[in-house]
Amino acid sequence: MKYKSKITGYKLKTVIVSIGVVLFAAIVGVKFIYQPTKEKISAIESIQKEEEEKNKLLKQVSKRRKDVQRRRLRLSKNKNASYFINQITKLADESGIEIISIKPGLFQREDYYQKLPLVLEAKATYNQLGEFISKLESSRQFILVEEMNLRKEEGKIGSSDAIKVRASLTASLFCSPR
């Protein structure tokens, strides 16, 4: 019987030592392998998020640059107010608008462009006015309607039931600064 207890005691010591070695290896593994690796992974993930944010910003910058280049191409090279008035008159005629008056303003210099405001008084139907503004803002030149006031005019246009309005528009032609 004593022999059996010695074997059992020996096995118990072996099991305890084995468990101790396994625990020691686990603690060393966690302390010296897992935690540093986890910290490196966290640092890499943080860097990755920063890079993703930078990439988003770079995409936005690229998109803005393309937009600026597209708009720069639309800046008029011609800074002659009469040219601008002729262009607007032509678009108004195409849209069936009756122009009452056109008053050009003074050139306003900005850092990257010049702006020539123009105050336009006209009579038209809502549809004609909408067509005119659409043509104006989609023209080759960079023209922007910055202000618009409408008043109902007495009477109808011709035999149609269309309501006539009197419009006061402030449109600006954007020109290159040079």
Image (cartoon, grey):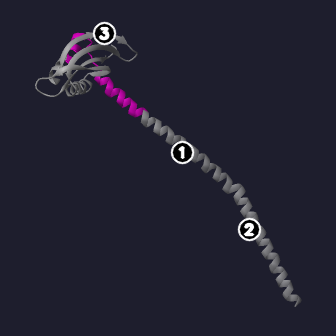
Please determine whether, in this image, residue 2 is positioned above or below residue 87.
below
How many C-alpha atoms fall within 10 Å of the one at disc 3: few (<14), some, or many (≥20)? some
Q: Amino acid type of disc 1?
A: Gln
Q: Is residue 70 within the magenta segment?
A: yes
Label 2, label 3: how far apart the Cα atoms are: 88 Å
Q: Residue furthest right?
A: 2
Which of marks 1 and 3 precedes in the sequence? 1
Query: Residue at image x 80%, y 73%?
Result: 16
Please tell me whether residue 59 belongs to the stretch shown in magenta.
no
Element class at badge 1: helix
With 116 as the anchor, is 52 left or right in this view? Answer: right
**Circle nearer the N terminus (2, 3):** 2
Assign the N terminus to one quadrant of the image: bottom right
At horizontal 75% and vertical 66% (from top left) the residue drawn is: 23
Q: For numbered disc 3, what is the local secondary structure? A: loop
Front one among 36 and 55? 55
Q: Which residue is mark 1?
A: 48
Q: Earlier in the sequence, mark 1 or mark 2?
A: 2
The segment highlighted magenta reads 61-88
Q: Is residue 94 left or right of residue 40?
A: left
Q: Which residue is mark 3?
A: 105
Is residue 69 visible to the viewer in this orientation of the structure?
A: yes
Residue 22, disc:
2
Q: Are marks 2 and 3 in contact (CB under 8 Å)?
A: no
Residue 42 screen position, x and y as percent: 61, 49
